[in-house]
Structure formats: structure tokens, C-alpha cells
Image: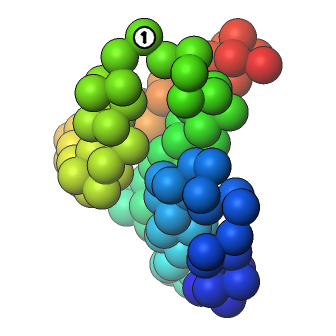
Amino acid sequence: MIGYLIYKGTKVEKHEPNIYLLWISSGIVAIGSIYFHGNLSVAGQIMDELPLLMLVFFGLFLLIPLHKWYSLRFRNILFSWQSLACGNAGGFLLTMLNPTASHFMVLMMIPCTVGMI
């Protein structure tokens, strides 16, 4: 929260207006980590891993400059709070129904991250 308040209104926010999604994702990661390490449950593990994947996902796509996107409309949909909320909620439900999906999603993020860099 303090980091967001420091960077609010700076050149970084003017260049990339959706940087707040990284701050929100970081906060959700912190809450999920506290919950997981507090009770060591499967739900806590998913609440720890899923926001971390969303943070990496948003972080990697924010590295792409605005002029390199083919469709700015798709980019605006991708970087909306609705996509953050629906992605976390949908992923949480999916991984609660099938916990191996959580491990699959974590392992699939490695080649995606290497491919984006």
C-alpha cells in the first residue's frame, strides 16, 4: 500500500496506467501467503500460488510497450480489475475442484515466463 502511494502520480503511472494491478496482486499474494503459512491447508496453498501466477502474468504483459499491442481494446480488457477478480476466482474454483490443476498451472508458467523474456 505504501509503495502504491509513493508511485501514485509519477512518470511510471503516466506511462503505464494499469500499474495498480501489480500493487493489488502483491497485496493478494501477501494475504494468501499469510493464510497458507498459518494453517497449511490445500485451500491456503491455492490462495498462495494463484495470485502469484496472476502477478507474474500481469507483470510480463506490462513489459510490452503500448505501441506494440495489435489491439488496445484487448489490452484494456486484459488489464481490468474484472479480469483480475474473475481470473483469481475462476482459478480458485478450478483448483479447489481439482488440486492438480494448481500444480499444472504453476509448471506451465515457467515456459511462458521464459518465452516472454
Q: Would residue 84 appear left or right of 66 to someone viewing this image?
A: left
* Image spot of residue 40 (x, y percent): 54, 70
Q: Inspect this view and state whether residue 88 appears.
A: no
Q: Residue at x 56, y 21 (%)?
A: 67
Q: Residue at x 63, y 49 (%)?
A: 15
* Image spot of residue 17 (x, y percent): 50, 55
* Image spot of residue 75 (x, y percent): 38, 30
* Nearer-the-camera pick, 27 or 74: 74
Q: Inspect this view and state whether residue 55 appears.
A: yes
Name the amino acid type tagged 1. Tyr
Give the answer, above or below, for where 23 lies relative to 75: below
* Image spot of residue 98 (x, y percent): 28, 35
Q: Crowding at label 1, few (<14), some or many (≥20) Cα neighbours within 10 Å?
A: few
Q: Residue at x 42, y 11 (%)?
A: 70
Q: Residue at x 48, y 53 (%)?
A: 18
Give the answer, above or below, for where 32 lies relative to 69: below
Q: Would residue 64 appear left or right of 20 to someone viewing this image?
A: right
Q: How many numbered marks does the figure carry?
A: 1
Give the answer, above or below, for where 11 lies relative to 77: below
Q: Which residue is mark 1?
A: 70
- How is colour applied across the structure in the image? rainbow
**Where is residue 5, by image quadrant?**
bottom right
**Where is residue 74, by image quadrant?**
top left
* Nearer-the-camera pick, 88 or 2: 2
* Nearer-the-camera pick, 52 or 66: 66
Determine the secondary structure under disc 1: loop
Q: Quadrant of the C terminus?
A: top right
**Where is residue 11, by image quadrant?**
bottom right
Q: Quadrant of the N terminus?
A: bottom right
